[in-house]
Image (tube, rainbow, N blue to C red):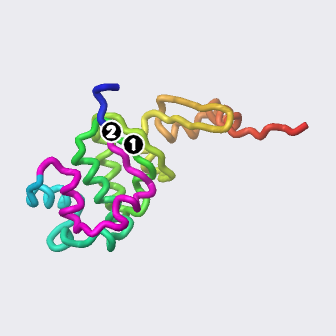
Amino acid sequence: GVTTSRSYFPKDNGKYFDNCEYNLIDWLRQFSQSQYESDIRGWLGRMLFSGDEVTKKTQVLSGGEKVRCLLARMMLSGANVLLLDEPTNHLDLESITSLNNGLIAYPEVILFASHDHECVATVANRIIEIGHHGYIDKMINYNDYLEDETLAAQRENLYRKEKRR
């Protein structure tokens, strides 16, 4: 809709950091309306980058550090629709817990794909499963979705193999 603004978190985030000579402050500054270093440091601090870590070059970031940078970029956008593809990949347990809590508290729309059972079980309130023979769309939490016998039969039909003649 015309009132939506979206922010995307890709599973493959290398293009945001490869061939980039920026330090973290300069990298995040390119996505910020505020150009003040103190504001940028504040956003990086929310993502657990402190002190001299903010001058680290983007080429040497670990997978988890890249994820935290992209999450800071998403927060800066002020979007009301978040699209996340495997957001917990590369994060440590403490970061995953913080992310889950943030996503649970987020008042707007989140569309995400994840193999992280805990993340899906705690964040999702609507499950959409797409298979070879259709889809299932239910307003239900993930654990109830998995335990529902009627839905289990529907899931089997989504992935049934066609018989050859």
Q: Which amino acid lies under the numbered mark 1 shown in the image of this protein?
A: Leu
User: Tag 2 or tag 1, which sits nearer the N-term?
Assistant: 2
Q: Is residue 105 left or right of residue 54?
A: right
- Residue 154: percent from left, percent from top: 66, 32
- Circle 2: is it few (<14), some (14-19), or many (20+) Cα within 10 Å? some
Question: What kind of residue is marked 2?
Answer: Arg
Task: Give the residue displayed 68% in from the left and 33% down from the top.
Answer: 133
Label 1: element kind: strand
* Residue behind mark 1: 83
Percent across and percent down for residue 33 are: 15, 47
| Furthest-right residue in this view | 165
**Residue 150 left/right relative to 48:** right
Quadrant for the C terminus, please. Answer: top right
Vertical position of residue 85 compared to residue 161: above or below: below
42, above or below 101, in the image = below
- Magenta residues, start to end: 7-34
Residue that mark 2 sits on: 6
Q: Tell me whether the residue at label 1 lies in contact with that at label 2, contact meaning CB atoms closer than 8 angstroms.
A: yes
Q: Is residue 153 left or right of residue 99?
A: right
Mark 1, other Cα within 10 Å: few <14 / some 14–19 / many ≥20: some
Residue 118 in the image, given as x and y percentages of width and height: 45, 50
Q: Where is residue 56, by image quadrant? A: bottom left
